[in-house]
Amino acid sequence: MENSNNKNSNIKPVIAISLLTAACLVGDSMLYIVLPTHWQEAGLSSLWEVGVLLSANRLIRLPLNPIVGWLYQRISSRIGVLLATLLAVITTASYGLLQGFWLLLAMRCIWGIAWTFLRLGAYFTILDFSSDNNRGHFMGTYNGLFRLGSLVGMLAGGLLADSFGLKTTAILFAALTACSIPCIFLFIPKALTHQRDVATGCIPTAHILKEWPVVWALLTGAVVAMIYQGLFNATISHLIKTLYSEMVSIGGFLIGAASLAGILQALRWSWEPWLAPWFGRRSDGRGGRRFLLTSTLLLATALFTLIPLQLPILFWLFLLLLLQVTATILTTLADAVASDVAVSTSKAVVMTAYSFAIDLGAALGPLAAYLLTQTMGPEYTYWFAGVVLGLISLKWLIASPMSQAD
């Protein structure tokens, strides 16, 4: 009973920071749905400005990760998360209150700062409250819950903006984010153990990042982000259009390629609060992480090989849903593997480098996808993804790059 109470106590800060992240994410997710259709209401003059605004926050995060990681060695997660939440309130409100490209570009860059603080704050909180027996479960809980913000922002944001306009929607979402601030003081502790790296860590950062377990954890995270966050998300609507035309007939109903892609993404976000913690829990303990990671990588390799083929539509959609499940599993396990390595080396150094690696992978994914699609065709893009995942799976299958996964 005592162990159960301790486990429940430890997971409360993880749940809190996951839901805080979700509350901060609603404005950003709303913008991805609303801005392409309400761009004139935001004072923009062309659609290319929409593309720049929606990608600026990702680009700014790359150089920010080392800076924010350095700051987290000197401040508590509570301060970092509070700063991020305040910035999220400001930026979300600005989407409705400010007009013009340059002002909104500045706000999108500020949101990039907020997201970097949020994600690293969440990683450090999970590391501080987890153990080898529950780290996968806690990472899965975080990954599952924070995406609820994306789901709410995407679904409610579109409906509210069409009914009441961008300004009203942005202000409502900013108020929702502001309501989460008291939770920071209730559930996020002041002093956390990742700060010990400053006092006790004498190993140079470069030496830590050259260790093979660290290298493989970073590479696994970068590849998963590149394939799923970048390549798959950027090309799935184009692949649907290429294989089955602009409008897809399912059960006598016509659904647009973009709408179908959006529905598939929404389904993933809706099941992740349950599936991600479940798979994370299954991976905890000796041998679980490596077996589940390797088998899922092999399954994803097979799925990426089959999906570019024009199969019966219902069977093809089943394969796509199965691929989305592998995205849930691999994202959770990649985070768990990185946290395993971080605990045995340096929490601040490894998780900062990991955050940079997944941002870099997510940024390179769309670029690689469209270069391959333009030069060779969309099917080669997915086969490329399958080959890359297959190579990573072989390495994990032959010899585990880290002892914690064994």
Image (spheres, rainbow, N blue to C red):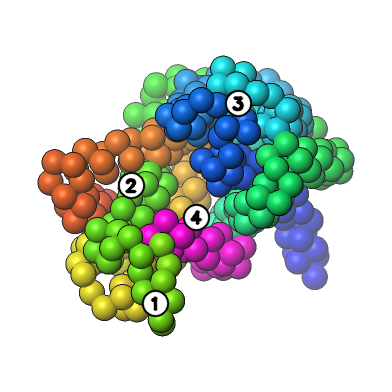
Report the residue marked by disc 2.
231
Q: Left or right: 351 with respect to 129?
A: left
Q: Secondary structure at mark 2?
A: helix
Name the residue type under label 1.
Ile
* Alpha-carbon span between mark 3 and mark 4: 39 Å
* Alpha-carbon span between mark 1 and mark 3: 38 Å
Of circles 2 and 1, the one toward us is 1
Name the residue type under label 4.
Thr
Within 10 Å of the Cα at label 4, are there few (<14), some (14-19), or many (20+) other Cα atoms?
many
Q: Earlier in the sequence, mark 2 or mark 3?
A: 3
The prevailing secondary structure element of the residues shown in magenta is helix
Above or below residue 350? Residue 180 is: below
Rendered image quadrant of residue 11: bottom right
Q: Earlier in the sequence, mark 1 or mark 3?
A: 3
Name the residue type under label 3.
Gly
Rendered image quadrant of residue 4: bottom right
Magenta stretch: residue 36 in it?
no
Q: Earlier in the sequence, mark 3 or mark 4?
A: 3
Q: Earlier in the sequence, mark 2 or mark 4?
A: 2
* Alpha-carbon span between mark 1 and mark 4: 32 Å
Rendered image quadrant of residue 356: top left
Mark 2 and 1 residues: CB-CB less than 8 Å, in contact? no
Of circles 3 and 4, the one toward us is 3
Within 10 Å of the Cα at label 2, are there few (<14), some (14-19), or many (20+) other Cα atoms?
many
